[in-house]
Image (cartoon, rainbow, N blue to C red):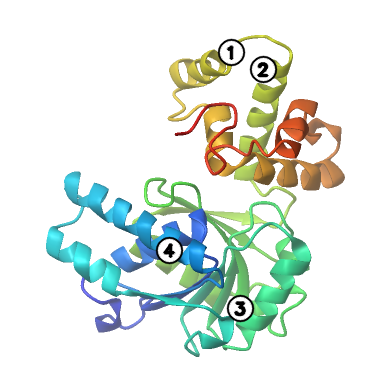
């Protein structure tokens, strides 16, 4: 693990994360591992407790795999602080990233509150919502862009940087610098529906669900086809369980509106979400999670 990035002028030293769900927890982990001081905002005590437990598991795994040392693991956790309100964020952080659910009014409200803390860069982890539309809620949209991470954040070495029509070069440069500090590659994409990765990922997942719905093969064998024939590390149905079926459904409906019927959600996906079968977080999806 590197020492504090504040010792290196020009690098990113302070990060805010709003939302302590799966993605927010992962972002906090990689930022702390890169030497940043991290402030995580989460209003729900249960979610905060779950974050600390997930971080402990990630640290333990990192030590076992030799990615970090025992002494570094204690330092990593000490760099992360938990807050309950956005107005508790330190002023003028280098980057603040929102990771709340894919709900446009909610994200706009959160971004408006974040801007009051005057961070140098404001980012959204959205995987489907328009960066331009979100940015229109900010008084200084030049500071705003999309920073789309992938689950699990600590394993997948990619950040998709989504550039809006008003995004300034300073914000892009800061996001690229943060990507490098966390050991990740980055993509620069324009603000089109679904960006690049969500469109590719979602279309494969929806087709896999349609295949399962039609009885083409079992969920296990559909995933094995993707893994063994095409080298995917995780099959599309298991990945949907990890991401959350409700999240997949929200993204599918958003892209159907903007890109047409090829992104229409299958009936099976809708039915499973209605039954509360959301994947890993509910204990059941296309697979059983114990």
Q: Residue at left 58%, top 69%?
A: 123
User: Is 246 drawn above or below residue 89 in the view shown?
Assistant: above
Dividing the picture into quadrants, the one containing residue 78 is: bottom left
Mark whose residue sits in front, 1 or 4: 4
SS of the residue at dot 1? Answer: loop
Mark whose residue sits in front, 4 or 3: 4
Q: Is residue 171 left or right of residue 12?
A: right
Residue at numbered disc 3: 143
The mark nearer the N terminus, 4 or 3, is 4
Residue 202 appears at what percent x and percent y? 66, 36
Residue at numbered disc 1: 218
Q: Residue 49 carries which label?
A: 4
Q: Residues within 10 Å of mark 2 (few under 14, many from 20)?
A: some
Q: Residues within 10 Å of mark 4 (few under 14, many from 20)?
A: few
Q: Which mark is residue 212?
A: 2
SS of the residue at dot 2? Answer: helix
Q: Residue at left 65%, top 82%?
A: 113
* 3 and 2 marks in contact (CB < 8 Å): no
Q: Say which quadrant the C terminus sits in.
A: top left
* 1 and 3 marks in contact (CB < 8 Å): no
Whole-number angstrom distance, CA of label 2 to CA of label 1: 6 Å
Could you say which is closer to the camera, residue 81 or residue 200? 81
Residue 159 appears at what percent x and percent y? 49, 54
Q: Residue at left 72%, top 35%?
A: 275
SS of the residue at dot 4? Answer: helix
């Amino acid at each position: 693990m590197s020492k504090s990035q504040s010792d290196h002028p020009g690098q990113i030293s302070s990060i805010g994360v709003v939302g302590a769900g799966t993605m927010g927890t992962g972002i906090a982990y990689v930022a702390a591992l890169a030497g940043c001081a991290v402030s995580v905002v989460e209003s729900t005590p249960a979610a905060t407790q779950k974050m600390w437990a997930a971080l402990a598991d990630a640290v333990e795994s990192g030590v076992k795999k030799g990615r970090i040392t025992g002494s570094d693991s204690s330092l990593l956790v000490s760099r992360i602080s938990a807050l309950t309100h956005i107005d508790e964020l330190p002023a003028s952080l280098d980057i603040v990233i929102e990771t709340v659910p894919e709900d446009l009014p909610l994200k706009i409200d959160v971004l408006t509150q974040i801007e009051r803390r005057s961070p140098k860069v404001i980012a959204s982890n959205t995987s489907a919502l328009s960066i331009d539309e979100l940015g229109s809620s900010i008084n200084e949209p030049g500071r705003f862009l999309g920073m789309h991470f992938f689950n699990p954040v600590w394993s997948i070495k990619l950040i998709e940087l989504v550039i809006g029509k008003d995004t300034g070069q300073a914000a892009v440069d800061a996001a690229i610098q943060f990507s490098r500090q966390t050991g990740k590659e980055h993509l620069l994409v324009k603000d089109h529906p679904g960006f690049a990765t969500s469109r590719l990922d979602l279309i494969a997942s929806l087709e896999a669900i349609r295949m399962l719905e039609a009885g083409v093969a079992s969920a296990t064998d559909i995933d094995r086809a993707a893994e063994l024939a095409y080298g995917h590390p995780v099959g599309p149905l298991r990945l949907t369980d990890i991401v959350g079926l409700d999240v997949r459904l929200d993204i599918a409906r958003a892209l159907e509106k903007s890109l047409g019927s090829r992104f229409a959600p299958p009936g099976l996906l809708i039915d499973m979400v209605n039954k509360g079968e959301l994947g890993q977080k509910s204990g059941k999806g296309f697979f059983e999670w114990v």
